[in-house]
Amino acid sequence: MEWSAGTVSVAGQVLDYACWGPAPGDAPTLVMLHEGLGSVGLWRGWPAELAAATGMGVLAYSRAGYGRSSTVTLPRPLDYMSREAVDVLGPLMDAAGIEHAVLLGHSDGATIAGIYAGTVSDMRVRGLILVAPHFFTEPEGLEAIRAAKVAYETGDLKDRLARHHDDPYVAFYGWHDAWTAPGFAAWNVADAIDHWRIPALVVQGAEDAYGTLAQVWEVEERAYSPIEALIVDGAGHAPHQDAPEIVTPAVAGFCETLLALEGAHSEAH
């Protein structure tokens, strides 16, 4: 796996990825986990901006069924986010040669990062940056997901997704049908938060249609590790796109503090 862009075979899947900034041997790495309809390309310019703002390397990849990665068979299992955390994320970081990481996830990707930190013992992972995470279902979010189906089937969402996904049908319905399945209403992975032992920055748009501030409150109430919460007024489900002038410096500041604390700890020992 070269530190630039390409594909890598992980857990029986061929995943497309791209990298920015220093290689893992030269600096810590931000590992970016995309949202339920995202991909490497749909991060747009943010990975490069984060590499410049933090001095860290950045690795983004498209999960199977998204972007240019191999497809999957539908329907997705309702525990697909837990499976991604347990089966794919660690081996991907192994393949990339990552030694010190901060996981940065958006929406489904934030949930996957949170599950990983709470279920997998991995000393490489030093911090979490969770943008619009969800740890349980909410009626408002499920309503917004059902509305997205209308936009896909009657609006231009399908065409927009087709520019970024080899199989937009699998990308959309793999996400939509899992979240709207009758058995998913009781989905809750908040117990993963109880087992975090690393600092976390949680970023939430105040106008997010897919999740409320209850997701942030759940983290603040359950976590034993240091938590920072950033509520971005006027921002929706993608506050890093709606208000990059707020979110990017917050991410950079979190990483700077985290690395400074690690450096001080290393010098003390």
Image (cartoon, helix red, strand yellow):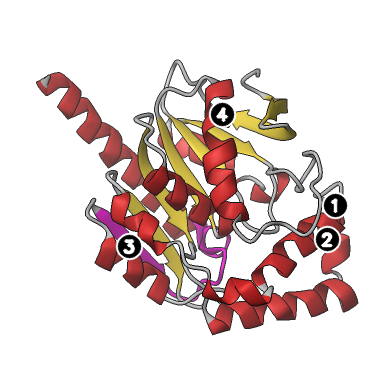
Q: Which mark is residue 211?
A: none
Q: Are marks 2 and 3 in contact (CB under 8 Å)?
A: no
Dot 3: element: strand
- Mark 3 Cα-neighbour bin, 10 Å: few <14, some 14–19, many ≥20: some
Alpha carbon separation for disc pair 2 and 3:
32 Å
Q: From which residue to which does the magenta span run?
A: 227-244
Residue pointed to by mark 1: 163
Between the residue at mark 1 and the residue at mark 4, the CA separation in whole angstroms equals 28 Å
Q: Amino acid at mark 2?
A: Arg
Q: Is residue 249 visible?
A: no
User: Of the residues under marks 2 and 3, which one precedes in the sequence?
Assistant: 2
Q: Amino acid at mark 1?
A: Arg
Q: Residue at x 50, y 54 (%)?
A: 110
Q: Which residue is mark 2?
A: 160
Are the residues at dot 2 and dot 1 in contact (C-beta closer than 8 Å)? yes
Q: Which residue is mark 4?
A: 91
Q: Residue at x 78, y 75 (%)?
A: 149
Which residue of the protein is positioned furthest toward the front in this rendering? 183
Using the numbered discs, state the Cα–Cα distance from disc 4 to disc 3 in whole angstroms: 30 Å
> Looking at the picture, how far across and down is residue 43, in whole percent?
64, 48
Q: Which of the two discs, 4 and 3, sits closer to the camera?
A: 4
C-alpha separation, residue under disc 2 versus residue under disc 1: 6 Å
Instruction: Say which amino acid is labelled 4.
Output: Pro
> Within the magenta stretch, is there residue 243?
yes
Q: Is the Cβ of the residue at disc 3 closer than 8 Å to that at disc 1? A: no
Q: Give neighbour class at mark 4: few <14, some 14-19, many 20+ (Cα, 10 Å).
A: some
Query: Where in the figure is residue 119, as x and y percent of width and height?
Result: 41, 45
- Quadrant in the picture for the N terminus: top right
Residue 253 % position (x, y): 33, 45
Where is residue 263? Give x, y as percent: 22, 26
